[in-house]
Structure formats: structure tokens, C-alpha cells
Image (spheres, helix red, strand yellow):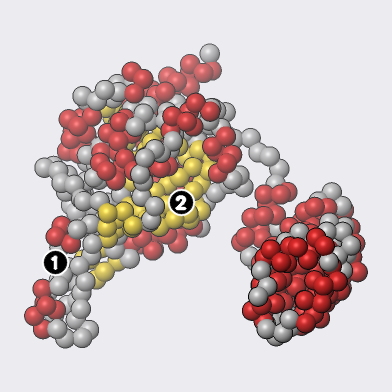
Amino acid sequence: MVTKEYIQELKRKNFEELYRLIRETQESRELFFILENLGYLPNGFKGEVFVPLIVHLNDSVRFWAVKNLGKISNPDFIGLLLRTAKYDKDSMVRREAVSSIGRMRTQQTIPYLIELLDDSDPKVVLQAIRGLLVFKTNIEAQKALRNLENHPNEMVQSVIRREFSQNHNSKNQQPHPSSPDFMKNVVVHGDVREILRHVPDESVHLTFTSPPYYNARDYAIYESYKAYLDFLMEVFSEVHRVTKEGRFLIVNTSPIIIPRMSRSHASKRYPIPFDLHARLGESGWEFIDDLVWLKPETCVKNRNAGFLQHRKPLGYKPNAVTEYLMVYRKETEKLLDWNIHQYSWKAVEESKVNGEYETSNVWKIDPAFDSVHTAVFPIALCNRVVEFYSYKGDLVFDPFGGSGTLGKAANNLGRYFFLTEQEEKYFERMKENLTTLDAVKLHQPRFLKVDEFKLLNQGENDGHNN
């Protein structure tokens, strides 16, 4: 039986015996094992031994034959690899053939890689781009790459933008970890759309919110479902403007049922998370993750009673025990590492998530109840979001502040909060809940009307101008 150790010994001491082993092994699984475990190939290793395997019937054998051929870095094999990249029946083999051409890192590969930019498989194109970026300063390679700016595939577009976009200056000259003092631990009573007009660009590090449900509460009555979604997009478009580059928006929603008008009419279920998702994706928010908030079945409305009695197919209605936390990032060509590197070593260390944490996207958290607000965040949910998606000293925003639970979580975890709320009774409830906080860095909570907030903004701007 061939072992890894035997393969490595032959590679060190007896090339000819290793060539014979590769040529004479007939069983696909054993041949695959040999090719997979060759590892680094030293100078003088003959790539010709892999050439017959390029047309082997087994996809895995072909893949590893191509991969090992790429390790040889012999330009004589470029033509063979090009044909494999264009015509092999297996997409993984094709992509590996492109990668093997790119690994040769010789200018002889440029025209071949350019030819592969026209492939119909975006992953083949991305591998060809990767190979060409080694020669980014070569005029021919650069021209071919820039021609991909309007490529139909969004991943290709993103890579090209990242490589060739000009560095832009942020509209807000504040350092990334900073936020305006006049917004720290502030709650504003009024229409969030009006309030956001007085918020500077790129002021907020994290937004976590649960929008009012469509026509499910007295404070959330809209003429139509379209009008409801349009309202939310007005808000989230402004949230996009005030969010720091590359930072997160997390939206808690779930489908909603509007009860039927009478027994002769049907109820209607609206897929809010999914309809909102499509709009957010078109307005500069990059989708990152879907988190599922799982609640105990005893805490939700029972939709199963009828089916429990009659058991008739088509009449099944499950109890809705989940809500979504949809995670979005403000689109940027910069990687998350850039955001992290904006913070000092001390800030990063102090903000690390210690101890056990939830490793899956299903978060089992009991709901919370409030004597005034009918739909409040559990503090455990807010704590988790704030801890996972912000740093100490960051400014955390909830445009639909409700009872102010996010403010409590932010304060408890060493962040600042900025909350807005249109309903008078909820604004007053937040005063009760947040007034007694042991506030972060002596920024005592302030509760303002829109005009008072506007004056604060003007005062801060005047101070910077003087």
C-alpha cells in the first residue's frame, strides 16, 4: 500500500521510481492519493509524467494532474493548460488550469490569461484576473483588466473597482473611531427622517433596529405596503449616508400577517424581510449574513389550533417562532481588516469578545415584555449585536428607539447611543429607562426635541469653524 511517507521518500531519493509509480497506477483512488500528496516539486522534476493524466476519466485525477503541472512552472505547458481551461468538462479542473497558468508568473502567460477573461464562468475569469494582477503595470494587462469594469458579474466588477479605483477622501474628516460629541447618549423625539437631516455624514458606527411592522400597530399605519417599504427606504438611505465607511446595519424583521376582513375573505402575509432586502441591496448595502432569532413556541401566537383539529392538507399553518436579523455592510472596496486597523491596539484588545459565544446563525433568546411598549428588544439580543458588531467608544444608532433597550446595551458595553423615536409615550418611556444610567465617559443621557438637536448640531459646527 502506498503511503505519504513512501511518496516523500521517492521524491527525495528516486525520481524514476516515482515516475513509474505514477505511470503504472491504474486505480483512480490510489492515483488520486499519490498526486494529492506529492506536495512541493523540486527543480528537475519532469512535468511530462502528468501530461497523459490531463485526459484521465476521473475528475479528481485530472484536477491534481493540472495542479501539479502548475507547480513545475514550465512555459512549455501553457498551451496544454489553456486547452484544459477552455474545454475540460469539469469546472473545478478548468479553474485550476487557469490558476496553474497564473502561478508561472511569467509575462508569456499574459495573452493566454487575457483570452480567458472572456470565459462564461465567472470563477475562471476571477482566476485569470488574479494571474494578470501580477502584471498590473503592464499596459496590455492593465487595459484588459480595466475593460472588465462593466463586466456582468458583480464579483468581477468588485475586484476591478478595488484594484483600480482612486483613493477617495471621506466626506467626514473625523477619524474612523470618532463620532460627534453632540450625538453621544442622545435621544431625539421626532420623525427620524427630519432628525437625520441634521446628522453629519459618516457619524454612526452601527445601526441596529426593528422597524414598525406594516399596519400591525396604531403607530404604524400606512396607505399601502409599497408606501410602507418606501418609508423604510427613505430612512435606510439616510442611515447609509450617516454610517461610517464599511460599517454595519442590522435590521430585525419578520413576515407579518394582516388578519382577514371577514370569514369570506383571506388574511394576507407580507414577506417584509425579503422585500426590504432587495431594496437595501440596490441602495448601497452589501448583504453579509442572515441571523435567525429563535423564540420559545410558548411565547408566540398559536396558528395551529385549526389544523390540530381537522388535519386537512393545505390547511397547515406553523407557529412563527423566528424573526430575522439581516446583516448589511455599507458598500466599500476596503476589507474588514481596514476597519479594524483604524482602532488602537488597546481599543481592539478591550473590545474582544471573551468567553463562550454563539457559533451558529440561530440565536435562541427569550422575548422581552414591557408595560408601555408592545414590541421591545430583549437586552440579551442587543448585547450580542453590540458586542459582535462594534468597538468600545463607538456610536450605536436605533432610528426606531422604542423603549431604549439598545441604549442600555450600548452603555453597559462601553459604547455611546443615539436614539430617535416619533411616539411621545415611547420617548417618555426611554426617559424613565435611560435617565439613571451610569453613563459612558460622563456623557449623561440627553432627551431632546428636533429643534434642540438641530441647535446642538449648529453649535458643534460653529465650534469647529472658529
Please indicate, yes or no, whether residue 234 appears anywhere in the rendered image: no
**What residue is shown with label 2?**
328
Observer-nearest residue: 19 or 338?
19
- Is 339 left or right of 215, judged from the image as shown? right
> Where on the picture, by quarter, is residue 383?
top left
Q: How many angstroms separate mark 1 from mark 2 (CA)?
A: 32 Å
**Quadrant of residue 51 within the rendered picture:** bottom right
**Element class at badge 2:** strand
Q: Nearer the viewer, residue 348 or 228?
A: 348
Considering only vertical position in the picture, is 37 above or below 253?
Answer: below
Look at label 2 and name its amino acid.
Tyr
Q: Is residue 403 left or right of residue 453?
A: left
Mark 1 Cα shell of 10 Å, populated few (<14), some (14-19), many (≥20): some
Q: Secondary structure at mark 1?
A: loop
Q: Position of residue 380 (x, y in %)?
A: 27, 43
Left or right? Give the position of 61 relative to 403. Answer: right
The kind of residue on which mark 1 rests is Asn
The quadrant where residue 133 appears: bottom right
* Residue under numbered circle 1: 302
The structure residue drawn at horizontal position 80% and vertical position 80%, both measured from the top left corner, is: 23
Q: Earlier in the sequence, mark 1 or mark 2?
A: 1
